[in-house]
Structures are given as C-alpha cells and as structure tokens.
Amino acid sequence: MVTEKIPVVAIMSSGSLAGIMALLFEFSHIANLVAVASLLAYSMVSFSVLVLRYQPDQNLSKSEKTEEETETELVPVGSPLDSVPEAGTSNILKSLWFPTSTTPTQKSGQIVYRCAFLLVLLLSIVSLVLAQWPRRVFSGDPVLTTVAVLLLLLITGVTAIIWRQPQSPSPLTFRVPALPVLPLVSIFVNLSLMMQMTSGTWILFGIWNAVGFAIYFGYGVRHSLEENNKPQPPASSSQTPD
C-alpha cells in the first residue's frame, strides 16, 4: 500500500505566515499586494507568448548556424565586405521590415525579443502618464499630449516590426490569435492597472520581493535539485606514484 507524505511543515509555516500578515496589515493592502503580483504574472505570460511564437525551432537554428559558419569561412580576408560597414547596417534595417526567411531564424528571434522589451518599456511609460495625469492628457496639454502621441507612434512602429517577422509554423493544440496585438493589449491593460496602485502597495511589494530573493538565492539555489545534479569536475591526479 502506497502512503502519500503530507508536507506538514510547509502547510504550518505558510499558514502561520498568512495569519501573521492578516494581523499586521490591513485587508486592502494585502488585496492590492496580491493584485500587483497577479497582474505582473499575467504580463509575464503575455510577454512569453509574444516572444516564443517568433523563436526558431532548435533543430532548424542549429542547421542555420552551421550554414552561416560555412559562409563565413568562404568569405576571404580583406574582402570588400570588411571595408563597407554601411552594408551591414543597411541589411539589419532591411531585415526589420523585409525578413529574408518565411520561418523564424536566430536573427528574427533576436529582433522580436529586443522589440518586445522596448514595447514593455514604452507601454509602462504610457500607462504611467495616463495613470498620473489623465485629465491633462485628454484636455489637450501640449507637453503631455505630444509625449503621449509620440509614444503611441513608437509603439505602433515597433509593433509593425514584430508583425513583419515570421511566426513559428509548429502545430500546437492552441495558438493565441491576433499576434502581436492581443498580447500587447493584455500587457497594456495589466500595466495600466498596476500603475494605479498606491505607493504603499509598491513599497510593500518591493519588501516582499527582497525577502523572496534573499530566501531563493540564500537557500533555494544551493539546495536545488538541478544544482546538486550538476556533474562534478574530475579530481586532479597530481599525486606521483610511489
């Protein structure tokens, strides 16, 4: 008969910590803290969906890398390509709008990855402006309205660059539709709600993150199964035989 072990220590410690938090903090602060963590998790999921759809298959990327290395070896030293750095810049700019392949490559994946990070930064700024000064933006304040319009134009341009990149053709049970717009809308809504939280909620969120990182890097990393399963380096055979 198989008996299941019950994590008594984990249940007691987490329950005690939840009770202490309920005694020390108001319910509204705890609810806001949970809301910030949930919205951040949803944003990370949307970001992952956006980035992973445009990443190349591992087997294809290895074969591509081999072909690129072969082409690099065939280029002679001191060729005209080395004396014209503008050609590389123009090729990069061209690949932003006219990708050379219909399937994701290492280059297109990196383009999407960097553009996605830039979009998160721009959406965070837009969400902050709309959360802090909504009346001034919509009433026609020249400075804030100009900033908002420029940010929206940049967001549209970077989104168009991601849209032009090839998506992965791998068959999946479910595929998120309307990429890259739908994940970006999800990130924008989550960031807008997060920017409306009070400063006290963000301070509490930062404190708990610091505590969590301290526990993870102080105990979790050293006691993780992956760390313990790493192959140990062979012992040095520096001893001389008798």
Image (cartoon, rainbow, N blue to C red):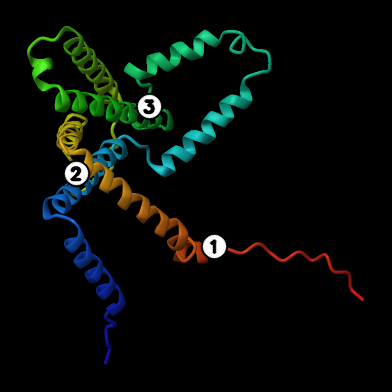
For residue 39, the mark is 2
Helix, strand, or loop for circle 3? Answer: helix
Image quarter hosting the C terminus: bottom right
Query: As rendered, which of 152 and 180 lies closer to the eye?
Result: 152
Q: Tell me how far mark 3 sits from mark 2, CA to CA.
A: 26 Å
Q: Tell me how far mark 1 sits from mark 2, CA to CA.
A: 35 Å
Can the viewer see residue 144? yes
Name the residue that disc number 3 marks. 111
Q: Mark 3 vs mark 2: which is more N-terminal?
A: 2
Q: Quadrant of residue 46?
A: top left
Q: Residue furthest bottom?
A: 1
Question: For mark 1, does the 10 Å Cα neighbourhood hold few (<14), some (14 to 19), or many (20 or more) residues?
Answer: few
- Identified by mark 3, the residue type is Ile
Work out whether 138 lies above or below 25.
above
Question: For mark 2, does the 10 Å Cα neighbourhood hold few (<14), some (14 to 19), or many (20 or more) residues?
Answer: some
Q: Residue at x 35, y 21 (%)?
A: 99
Name the residue that disc number 1 marks. 230
Query: As rendered, which of 219 and 132 lies closer to the eye?
Result: 132
- In-image side of 129 versus 99 (left or right): left
Work out whether 112 lies above or below 60.
above
Helix, strand, or loop for circle 1? Answer: loop
